[in-house]
Amino acid sequence: MPIYKYKANDKYGITFAGKMNASNTTEVIDRLKRKRIMPVKIEQVKISRAKARKREAKKIASTRKQLTYRVGADRVKSTFMNKVDINFSKVNVRDVIVFTQNLYSLKKADFNNVHALSTLLQATDNANLALIVEDMLNGVEAGQYMYSIMELYPDVFPPGYVGIIKAGELSGSLVNSLEQARIYLESTTKLKQKLRSILVPNITQFVAIIVLLIVGVIFVTPQIDKIYQSFGLTGKLPPATVAFTNFVDYIGSIWYIIVGAIVAVLVLILLYIRTMEGRFKFDLFKYKMPVFGDLIVLIDLKKFVNALKLNLLNGMRLQEALELSKEVVKNTVFLSIVETAKNNLINGDNWVEPFERVGIFPSMVTEMFKMGMDTDITEMVAKIEEYSEMDIDRKMENTIRVLPEISYSLVGIVLIAFVVIIMVPLMEVYMGSFLFEAYGM
């Protein structure tokens, strides 16, 4: 349960501060007022993810009996007592997809949020997810939106997912947004699996060959050098082997300087990214980076136009729809573009111009936005969504085709270096060709 710190005035008007465990700010206010204390300021205490996990684990360990009651009192005897069905495992993407699909089905059947979450709480097998669903239920009963509770669990609900739910709740189209959120999770998961299936084997090969190269230089080449010296051929190792051996020895002598420099650079980069300017430049780099940049742009564009379409279909004005739809994207470059477009719309200027000026979106998208200004913007946004989805598939195919070529090239370069540096002297020793020089033949 979240921790809130507050400042309040007691019945004598004296200001004091304190902390309280509560589901939400409404509960904090109610509990303080029952004690005749007037709250002045309330804010949630931010804690690190590591501390949050430890606190959650401690809570689960000390309150298992109460937890099983919350998950479903009718299942206590058959689950908790036998320790069969209660699942305290980590909440994974598949759990969230199933939860979203079930919530979508209940909402489509005209369940209200409280009834739907109560039903899902009884049916949730993962106890950690059950805790989160219970927090959502308490928040909804206290008058909060579901997305505001989801934001407290970024490890479970990705920001893009929460943004889609937020757009649906605030625009009154939660049923449609739940379906889109499920599709978003499934497509994102498939994308990650495809990239992982390409990158992991090739990175493993690359690292393995690098390790073999270094191990060979450290342990194998000294033995080969001893064989050469025993025949009076001092310093007759191949030049490439000698050069790389000297390089490895030099790196080994100053490794602490190199490690320190790398750590210092990484820390400086991370600190710079935390600044407003650094975050903006880093987000711009993600959009313009080789291979993946165009794909990232299209994925963010699809999330945005999907939310924009839902909001426009729900009767929102374009200005309001732009403001609400930008919540689904966390990239500061994209947010600044949408904010500028909204301001242009308020001032009566061309709101498509910021999308065109930045130069990261396909020209087809900006042209379709322009056409929507003169025709039906809702219909045109729907067409942009279809176009971006097709373009994502095309970019994904290109990425899948290019990545192996890049990885194979890197692996090939390292493999050639391994052959020249390690295998050539080994072959000379095995075949005995160096003996001809030793005996003057």
Image (cartoon, helix red, strand yellow):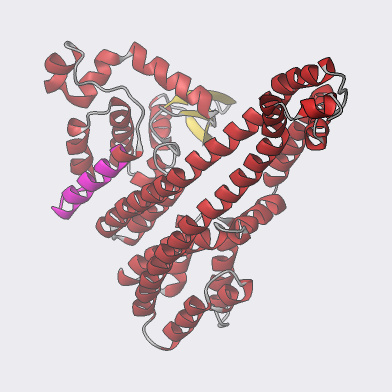
Q: How many marks?
A: 0
Residue 102: quadrant of the picture: top left
* Magenta stretch bounds: 95-112
Q: Horizontal and vertical percent for residue 233? A: 86, 23
The residue under the point 63% across, 59% down is 284
The residue under the point 44% across, 59% down is 396
Q: Is residue 352 left or right of residue 192?
A: right
Q: Is residue 63 magenta?
A: no
Q: Is residue 101 magenta?
A: yes
Q: Horizontal and vertical percent for residue 325? A: 44, 62
Image quadrant where one finds the N terminus: top left
Q: Is residue 30 depicted above or below 175 in this figure? A: above
* Outermost front residue: 441
Give the camera-side residue of 104 and 84: 84
Residue 60: quadrant of the picture: top left
Residue 437: quadrant of the picture: top right
Q: What's the magenta bit mostly, secondary-structure-wise?
A: helix
Q: Horizontal and vertical percent for residue 321? A: 42, 68
Give the camera-side residue of 148 and 306: 306
Q: Is residue 422 depicted above or below 343 in this figure? A: above
Q: Is residue 78 left or right of residue 10?
A: left
The residue under the point 47% across, 19% down is 54
Is residue 61 at all visible to an observer of this figure? yes
